[in-house]
Image (spheres, rainbow, N blue to C red):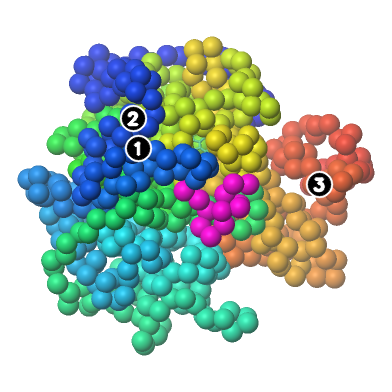
């Protein structure tokens, strides 16, 4: 965000009170805040956990915070996460309700009722058991957004095992490091998937990831289950690879869900941090499911009998875990999932899907909204969007112009918009309006949800006054909080709990309260970028760049971008001998491709500038702030702390 943006936000004066009929029928009322305040966090959440979930064995204590930052929620209770998302809805007589309307990119589609989805998950659980998967084992899932992705996640959860979903856009290298870090036993993948009107292969990346490494070390993976999606050719490793459909056809359809402790690990999800190595964020069962279910119901005002809910996220991200799989299915919702890209085969595809399934609640990222805005309102206006009654936004700040366009053009000028702030680490929504209660302000994520305590503080943990920027912290434990970084408790403490001590979670975001107590997010304060709502680490991309023989040194910044929020811009010093031969343009192209191949296409730099120097302080720290000025075409800021004050002039000249 630039200073101008912040200034605009300070002057945003539009207000949208909830429509009267919406408030009258709303799931969440203002009393919920009062209830949470009077009961206190742990008691409030214990009530929600009892109301929202089925416990095989009820818990007696809500929270154990005796060893911060390691929290235990509902510790002596036992439940089965998949049972809560499936069986209990069938047993309650809702087996015929559609759980998932799945839409494939090429136009194929399939719907699953709760009874059908339960049956599929039972079979998959039996298959995984036959393949040796037991409580606590890690299973990696590398799939396109097809029903089997949801089925696989729930089958793993049903066995008390731990899934690690790896986004289908990630490279073999990224799969390898994630599979190795988690020590996964089994990988579930597909031959390929569909994107942008074409099929793309997935299995070759898994094959490559599981090859012995340079030192001859072999992978922990003994089995690869392969879903047939595209029918494309695949290499086959006898004794390791199995076709999902052939195996599923042979297993028993009956499976009893066994209870597991509330703190049984549910999943690991890798996310970028400030160092080169992604962190395996660990979530557990009872607290996570409680908050995912509670927020999905109250923030999205879910009426499971009437609503058709659609989150456009992929299951490779936390939004896909909490608001495609666990929250909606725990709540017995009917939801849409769509495999492909928004513009395939035509730019109105999303709106066609909304019309086809009569979607009433839509949850999407600002970057998508801004893309549609650019294409123009005539595209959505060709479709009947009158079923929509609530819109959500997630992943990055939504600028007021995009917010108002979203409401006017997609929401017929009437639907509330909930701008939801949270993180992979928080597991579920932390800051958001409640749509039947809150008067909305475009651009503000507004207030902590009931039961959650946040503050904006200075470096010494003193609350910042209204309109004063500061650091966003969470001051009380919450049920869906991360339980750790897989295999690295020290890094967990260091990253989130060292700045202000072990009971104050530091989120990494800048924020401010306005005079009404509404929160405005101001972007990351660390070296983490946000590109199209996805988190990328400057350090990770820098280390990828320097791994190329052509590169001597690299610095990466997130420059603001009209569509994607931020874009990756790299400044690279090449080794003279290597790069001169290639020429600057070619070198840049090679390096962009190198990063895409090493990490994944989302990390591909928008620009790579070959420079002769990088701006550094006297202690040798790269001054990214100055590079960001250059990348955003701004006047270069204060350079007095540079070791060599000429550097920026030289860099700006090379770029012209
Ligand atoms: C970071 C977390 C939450 C699921 C998707 C991203 C930014 C997220 C908002 C929002 C402003 C937001 C923050 C946060 N962020 N939602 N509504 N307004 N910023 O999850 O990859 O873990 O990234 O995304 O900077 O720290 P993630």
Label 2 element class? helix
- Is residue 485 on the magenta stretch? yes
Residue 564 is a magenta residue: no
Instruction: Locate residue 315, reporting x and y percent.
Output: 38, 53
* Helix, strand or loop at mark 3: loop
Of 611 and 446, nearer the camera is 446
- Quote the CA–CA distance across marks 2 and 1: 7 Å
Q: Give the residue at mark 3.
A: 621
Q: Which residue is mark 2?
A: 43
Can residue 452 be seen in this snapshot?
yes
Name the foreground residue: 636 vs 120: 120
> Along the polypeptide, which appears first: circle 2 or circle 1?
2
Q: Which residue is mark 1?
A: 62
The answer to whether marks 3 and 2 mark residues whose Cβ atoms lie closer than 8 Å is: no
- Please give the label number shown on residue 636: none
Residue at 61%, 52% (x, y): give it: 491
Left or right: residue 496 versus residue 149 is right
Q: CA distance from mark 3 to mark 1?
A: 45 Å
Q: Nearer the viewer, residue 481 or 120?
A: 481
- Badge 3, how many Cα within 10 Å: few under 14, some, many 20+? few
Q: Is tag 3's residue or tag 2's residue first in the polypeptide sequence?
A: 2
Q: Residue 456: x and y, percent?
A: 58, 25
- In the rendered image, the quadrant that contains the C terminus is top right
**In the image, 619: left or right of 484?**
right
Crowd band around label 1 with a 10 angstrom C-alpha radius: few (<14), some (14–19), many (20+) = many
Region of the chain picked out in magenta, as a range:
483-494
Tell whether label 1 touches label 2 (CB within 8 Å): yes
Counting from the top left corner in percent of width and height, residue 233 is at 37, 79
Disc 1 is placed on an element classified as: loop
Residue at the limit of the structure toward the left, as seen here:
93
Q: Quadrant of residue 229?
A: bottom left
Work out whether 78 lies above or below 16: below
């Amino acid at each position: 965000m630039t200073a101008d943006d912040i200034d605009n936000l300070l002057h945003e004066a539009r207000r949208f009170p909830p429509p009267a009929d919406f408030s009258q029928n709303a799931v969440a009322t203002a009393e919920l805040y009062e209830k949470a305040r009077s009961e206190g966090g742990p008691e409030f959440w214990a009530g929600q956990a009892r109301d929202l979930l089925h416990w095989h064995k009820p818990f007696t204590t809500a929270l154990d915070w005796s060893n911060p930052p390691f929290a235990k929620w509902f510790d002596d209770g036992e439940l089965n996460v998949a049972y809560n998302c499936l069986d209990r809805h069938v047993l309650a007589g809702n087996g015929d309700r559609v759980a998932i309307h799945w839409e494939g990119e090429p136009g194929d589609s399939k719907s699953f009722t709760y009874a059908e989805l339960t049956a599929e998950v039972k079979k998959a659980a039996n298959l995984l058991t036959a393949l040796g998967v037991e409580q606590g084992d890690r299973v990696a899932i590398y799939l396109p957004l097809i029903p089997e992705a949801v089925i696989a996640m729930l089958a793993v959860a049903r066995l008390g095992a731990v899934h690690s979903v790896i986004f289908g856009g990630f490279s073999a290298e990224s799969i390898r490091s994630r599979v190795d870090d988690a020590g996964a036993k089994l990988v579930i993948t597909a031959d390929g998937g569909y994107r942008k009107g074409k099929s793309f292969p997935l299995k070759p990346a898994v094959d490559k990831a599981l090859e012995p490494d340079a030192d001859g070390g072999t992978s922990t993976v003994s089995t690869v289950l392969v879903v047939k999606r595209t029918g494309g050719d695949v290499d086959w490793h006898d004794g390791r690879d199995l076709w999902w459909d052939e195996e599923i056809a042979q297993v028993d359809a009956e499976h009893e869900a066994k209870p597991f402790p509330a703190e049984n690990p549910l999943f690991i999800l890798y996310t970028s941090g400030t160092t080169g190595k992604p962190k395996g964020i660990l979530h557990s069962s009872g607290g996570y499911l409680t908050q995912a279910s509670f927020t999905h119901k109250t923030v999205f005002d879910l009426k499971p009998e009437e609503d058709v809910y659609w989150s456009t996220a992929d299951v490779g991200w936390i939004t896909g875990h909490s608001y495609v799989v666990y929250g909606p299915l725990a709540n017995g919702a009917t939801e849409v999932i769509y495999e492909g890209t928004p513009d395939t085969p035509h730019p109105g595809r999303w709106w066609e899907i909304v019309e086809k399934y009569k979607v009433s609640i839509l949850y999407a990222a600002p970057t998508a909204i801004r893309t549609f805005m650019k294409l123009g309102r005539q595209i959505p206006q060709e479709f009947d969007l009158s079923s929509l009654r609530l819109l959500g936004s997630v992943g990055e700040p939504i600028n007021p112009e995009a917010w108002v366009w979203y409401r006017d053009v997609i929401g017929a000028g009437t639907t509330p918009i909930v701008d939801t702030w949270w993180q992979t680490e928080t597991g579920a929504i932390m800051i958001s309006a409640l749509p039947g209660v809150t008067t909305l302000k475009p651009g503000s994520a507004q207030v902590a949800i009931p039961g959650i305590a946040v503050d904006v503080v200075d470096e010494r943990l003193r609350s910042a006054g209204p309109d004063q920027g500061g650091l966003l912290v969470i001051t009380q434990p919450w049920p869906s909080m991360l339980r750790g970084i897989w295999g690295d408790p020290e890094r967990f403490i260091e990253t989130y709990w060292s700045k202000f001590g072990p009971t104050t979670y530091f989120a990494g975001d800048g924020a401010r309260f306005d005079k009404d107590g509404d929160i405005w997010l101001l972007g990351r304060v660390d070296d983490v970028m946000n590109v199209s709502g996805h988190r990328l680490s400057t350090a990770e991309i820098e280390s990828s760049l320097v791994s190329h023989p052509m590169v001597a040194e690299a610095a990466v910044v997130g420059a603001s971008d009209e569509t994607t929020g931020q874009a990756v811009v790299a400044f690279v010093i090449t080794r003279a001998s290597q790069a001169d031969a290639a020429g600057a343009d070619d070198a840049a192209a090679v390096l962009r491709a190198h990063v895409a191949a090493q990490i994944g296409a989302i990390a591909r730099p928008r620009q790579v500038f070959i420079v002769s120097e990088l701006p550094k302080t006297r202690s040798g720290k790269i001054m990214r702030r100055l590079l960001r000025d250059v990348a955003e075409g701004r006047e270069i800021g204060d350079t007095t702390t540079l070791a060599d004050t000429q550097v920026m002039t030289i860099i700006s000249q090379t770029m012209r």
